[in-house]
Image: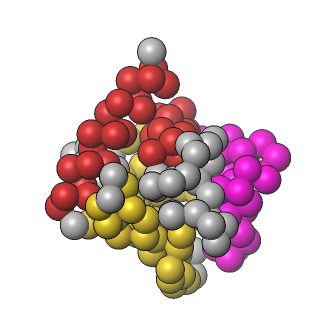
Amino acid sequence: MIHETVERWHSYMKGELPGGLDELLDNDVIFYSPIVFTPQHGKEITMLYLTAAAGVFPGDDQPQSSARSQTQNSAFHYTKKTFGENSAILEFETTMEGKYVNGVDIITCNDEGKIVEFRVMIRPLQAVNLVHEQMSRMLDQLNG
């Protein structure tokens, strides 16, 4: 099931998933941010964070879009995928304001293929600080 869920995630990233995140996320999904200490519970807050990330992570020289792009022309791209029974680790790279950003999306799904846990980890420290700054601005805009 995780392979299908990841394919649907990639479709979302391309802006090609009917229903978008609402269709992809379980109502009780838990989001683990690389910035916020406490886990974020529920579809609504997870959708907010993932929507904000979509606006932040296109990387340099890319227009900000409603979903992260993974085309060959995009600064943001996945470099590795590792699959477990019901989870996947998707490593990504991009540049933001000329700084290298490397991270992983760790996705866990249930038997229905809905994402029940989404965890993001980022490195190096300068990237974490930059993502924190840009995500704060984007969340303010979305909540504004």
Q: Residue at 50%, 80% (x, y): give it.
A: 79
- Left or right, residue 136 beside residue 77: left
The image position of residue 68, as x and y in percent, is 58, 53
Number of marks in the image?
0
Which quadrant does the N terminus fall into?
bottom right
User: Is 61 left, or right, of 119 in this rendering?
Assistant: right
The location of residue 123, given as percent across then percent down, is 26, 66
Would you say residue 13 sits in the magenta stretch? yes
Q: Nearer the viewer, residue 29 or 129?
A: 129
Residue at 42% x, 49% y is 31
| Residue in the picture at 27% in, 44% down | 132
Relative to 95, does residue 144 appear above or below in the rendering? Answer: above
The percent coordinates of residue 51 (x first, y second) are 54, 40
Q: How is the image coloured?
A: secondary structure
- Residue at the left extreme, as displayed: 125
Question: What residue sits 33% from the left and 52% below the top?
Answer: 97
Residue 88 against residue 140 in the figure, above or below = below
Q: Which of these two is toward me, 44 or 81?
A: 81
Residue 131 in the image: x percent, y percent?
31, 49
Q: Nearer the viewer, residue 64 or 116?
A: 64
- Would residue 24 appear left or right of 129 to someone viewing this image? right
**Residue 6 visible (yes or no):** no
Residue projecting furthest to the right? 18
Judge whether residue 126 can be spotted in this image: yes
Instruction: Identify the magenta region.
Output: 1-30
In the rendered structure, does residue 84 fall within the stretch colored magenta? no
Q: Quadrant of the C terminus?
A: top left
